[in-house]
Image: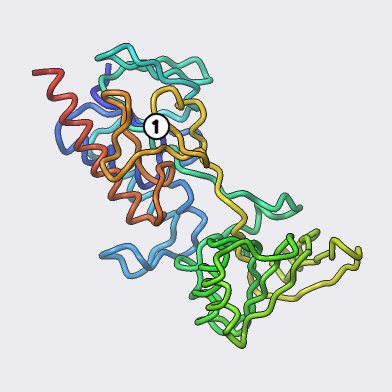
Amino acid sequence: MYDIIVVGGGPAGMTAALYARRNGKTVLVIEKNGFGGQITHSPKVENFPGIITISGTELADSMMSQILEQGADIEFETVASIVDNGQIKTVNTEEGGKYECMSVIIATGVKHRLLGLDGENELIGEGISFCAVCDGDFYAGKTVLMAGGGNSALQEAILLSDKCKQVVMLQDLPYFTGEERLQKLLFEHDNVSKYTSVKIIKLLIENGAFRGVEIQFTDTGEKKQIVADGLFVAIGLIPENEPFKDLAELNSYGYFNSDESCDTKTPGVFVAGDCRSKSIRQVTTAAADGTVAALAACRYVNEIKG
């Protein structure tokens, strides 16, 4: 039996494991895909304190090596459920694993909603991006496209408009759904143009590299190709918290309804990272959550052990 089990191997989960091990607790991290989460999609990370530049994959590998060096165990499995038996929690996986612990930290993160086009997955981090803060500098002086029309898309585009030669907004609705204030701020820029009532139907790929998109106007059926250097996608995030809704309340968007304490309604169960309701989702805020959740879990385990 472990003191603490961490569900999810992104920056929040790995930071939680690090702090828990530094506090002398036995720790298991269960990750279903690969360690690092969304950060692995960034070819270059330049906003992590103390590191001038590093690829997302390298940062994830370094964090994983660190927790392994500290003595954390890892399992590559998909957590199906967590059963609260009071002082003992049982974590069940789809592969048939059953792991017991005194405290659980859920750090399942989110996944970006994709366009569902051929070649999209292969171009993530190589022409298709999700974060202007992370990847905007790669497109300085270049032309980029932004898919989406909500607040997130508008905020990302505002950042890009200060760096890029041209920003082209692509919205599938007849109007932008983001705040009027953000729309005004964005479209004041001379280098920002927009298409509404359009659907991206094809990625233009040449020799494996992104070259633009083909759009179709939903009212007329007319098609048009737009050449660009990069595509930013901001059409929503999908939290994967449904299996744990009995342990931690979800808000209307499916995120854990927990504040900066990372606490939940279930004693001994904590949440951390992008899966939690929050206004800013960056690698640094994920790591901060992991720290808070780990220290809270350690205090809980200490109370049980007396």
The quarter in which the N terminus is drawn is top left
Residue at horizontal 58%, vertical 52%?
Answer: 236
Q: Is residue 68 visible to the viewer in this orientation of the structure?
A: no
- Quick check: 80 left or right of 265? right
**What residue type is disc 1 on?**
Val
Q: Position of residue 303 (x, y in %)?
A: 13, 22
Label 1, secondary structure: give it.
Answer: strand
Q: Using the image as rendered, state which of residue 73 and residue 174 is in the foreground.
A: 174
The quarter in which the C terminus is drawn is top left
Q: Which residue is mark 1?
A: 7
Residue 61, placed above or below residue 199? above
Residue at horizontal 26%, vertical 21%?
Answer: 2
Q: Position of residue 23 (x, y in %)?
A: 15, 35
Q: Using the image as rendered, state which of residue 33 and residue 232 is in the foreground.
A: 232
Q: Position of residue 167 (x, y in %)?
A: 63, 77
Residue at horizontal 75%, vertical 76%?
Answer: 227
Residue 243, placed above or below residue 251? above
Q: Using the image as rendered, state which of residue 301 and residue 41 is in the foreground.
A: 301
Residue 130, placed above or below residue 139? above
